[in-house]
């Protein structure tokens, strides 16, 4: 297949009429939108293959999301969990990258329109991932911070440190209480890991770094809408995480629905008795859900539950040459009526499978295999030396779980330099609770 240019999209702004400059060849053009786990693993499989890849992402880096919480509590420096896209694919001769924002897709003309121009495709792979889901609450979205990007993590770090500095200077008891109370909404892995990290900061670092603040005055509260934390994991994992967090003095509220947050108080409706609980805090971290990052131009009939409905080959419903992988894809089957979970392992495996299928399609005219998710287990860390791991063959907790969690995450980090830096940092912190430099480089303020 050759890259045939379609008619120029009529738009008064000149940059919209600019076509991406592609190498001269007769290879099929595969446009990939998004440099998350799905997108980069898809591209890696096609390195050096007879296809022309065009990667579009509005950021020039790939971020390792599982460790964002450690950046948020000054456990790691931001550049330890991000890798520049150009460095990641510097030896990939059949890929070009453009830092751009996708505005819409024209599936009739096989064209992707961005803010810097357009590009035609033979195959389109949507790997736009997900973002924080505030479930329509404008007040919560305005006054809280999610934990889905490196910017979120840096903002949380700045917000936390700014509040502690204000608490040191302040004399008003109620204001100090709000500044030193941290509420996390969502009892999944991200929320549990964030709560554990904050609790250890309070236990081991607050007294030495902020001697003016009584450690007992700093409070961490975790609010979960269901009747257990880590609901996607086993009962053993949930119970162990609950006990560990309680030992770290984390206040856990189960069966509580957060209805509103105005920047000073959180309103929680208890499912058991319908009563409302008010928590006064200046800091709300939202990890209660995610939603797919949809793009314009795809038929709304192909959207199910905020994601693009795809078949077992990854084809978007009703479109032959448009595919979706990772968090944005809802691969609905009898076994998975709601689609696969929005986790990194699904994205990685879907990226690899689709790459093989498209290569087979370009060579033989047909796909080679359906996607089958291999669940390798679930893990969550609860502090520096404690974690839970649900594996097919066994269940681990405590130090053994933490060692496995650390090993898996370390080998999964992109780039040798980042692996080395994170490994050294973890090794030092295993024998000491000292954090990275607690610097407020970029001040944060709520809009």
Image (cartoon, rainbow, N blue to C red):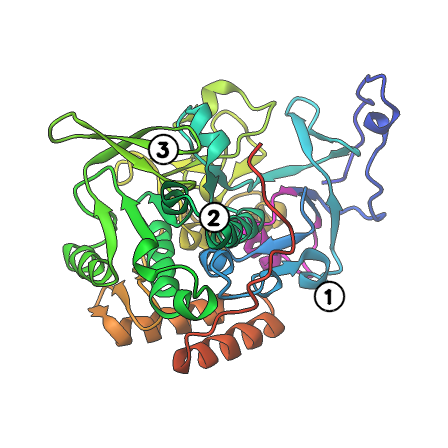
Q: Which residue is mark 1?
A: 91
Residue appearing at x 57%, y 64% in the figure? 77
Span shown in magenta:
32-53
Residues at badges 2 and 1 in contact (C-beta under 8 Å)?
no
User: Where is residue 349 shown, x and y percent of the image?
Assistant: 45, 54
Discs 3/2, front: 2
Picture layout, residue 264 above or below residue 41: above
Residue appearing at x 36%, y 33% in the figure? 265
The part of the image, by quadrant, that contains residue 306 is: top left
Q: Which residue is mark 2?
A: 170
Return the residue nearer the eye: 359 or 90: 90
Please tell me how crowded label 1 is: few (under 14), some (14-19), or many (20+) other residues with Cα within 10 Å: few
Q: Give the Cα distance between marks 1 and 3.
A: 51 Å
Residue 33 part of the magenta-drawn span: yes
Left or right: 289 in relation to 86: left
Discs 1/3, front: 3
Residues at badges 1 and 3 in contact (C-beta under 8 Å)?
no
Residue appearing at x 85%, y 29% in the figure? 15
Please tell me how crowded label 3 is: few (under 14), some (14-19), or many (20+) other residues with Cα within 10 Å: some
């Amino acid at each position: 297949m050759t890259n045939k240019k379609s008619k120029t999209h009529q738009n008064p702004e000149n940059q919209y009429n600019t076509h991406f400059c592609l190498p001269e060849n007769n290879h099929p053009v595969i446009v990939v939108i998004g440099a998350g786990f799905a997108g980069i693993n898809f591209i890696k499989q096609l390195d050096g293959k007879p296809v022309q890849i065009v990667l579009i992402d509005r950021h020039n880096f790939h971020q390792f999301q599982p460790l964002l919480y450690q950046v948020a509590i000054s456990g790691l420096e931001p550049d330890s969990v991000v890798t520049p896209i150009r460095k990641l694919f510097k030896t990939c001769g059949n890929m070009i990258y453009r830092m751009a924002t996708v505005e819409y897709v024209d599936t009739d003309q096989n064209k992707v329109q961005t803010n810097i121009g357009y590009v035609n495709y033979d195959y389109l792979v949507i790997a736009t991932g997900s973002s924080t889901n505030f479930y329509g609450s404008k007040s919560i979205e305005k006054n809280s911070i999610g934990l889905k990007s490196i910017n979120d993590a840096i903002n949380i770090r700045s917000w936390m440190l700014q509040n502690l500095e204000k608490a040191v200077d302040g004399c008003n008891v109620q204001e100090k209480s709000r500044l030193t109370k941290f509420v996390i909404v969502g009892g999944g892995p991200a929320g549990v890991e964030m709560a554990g990290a904050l609790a250890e900061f309070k236990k081991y670092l607050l007294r030495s770094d902020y001697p003016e603040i009584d450690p007992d005055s700093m409070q961490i509260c975790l609010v979960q809408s269901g009747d257990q934390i880590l609901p996607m994991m086993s009962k053993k994992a949930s119970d162990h995480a609950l006990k560990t967090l309680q030992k770290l003095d984390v206040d856990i509220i189960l069966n509580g629905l957060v209805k509103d947050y105005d920047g000073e108080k959180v309103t929680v409706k208890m499912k058991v008795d319908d009563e409302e609980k008010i928590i006064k805090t200046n800091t709300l971290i939202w990890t209660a859900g995610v939603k797919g990052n949809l793009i314009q131009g795809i038929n709304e009939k192909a959207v199910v539950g905020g994601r693009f409905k795809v078949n077992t080959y990854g084809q978007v419903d009703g479109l032959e040459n448009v595919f979706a992988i990772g968090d944005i894809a809802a691969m609905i089957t009898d076994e998975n009526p709601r689609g696969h979970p929005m986790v990194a392992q699904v994205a990685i495996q879907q990226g690899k499978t689709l790459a093989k299928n498209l290569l087979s399609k370009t060579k033989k005219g047909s796909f080679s295999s359906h996607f089958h998710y291999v669940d390798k287990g679930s893990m969550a860390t609860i502090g520096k030396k404690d974690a839970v791991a649900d594996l097919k063959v066994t269940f681990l907790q405590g130090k053994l779980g933490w060692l496995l969690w650390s090993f898996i995450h370390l080998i999964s980090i992109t780039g040798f330099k980042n692996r080395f830096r994170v490994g050294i940092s973890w090794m030092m912190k295993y024998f000491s609770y000292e954090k990275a430099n607690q610097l407020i480089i970029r001040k944060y303020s709520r809009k």
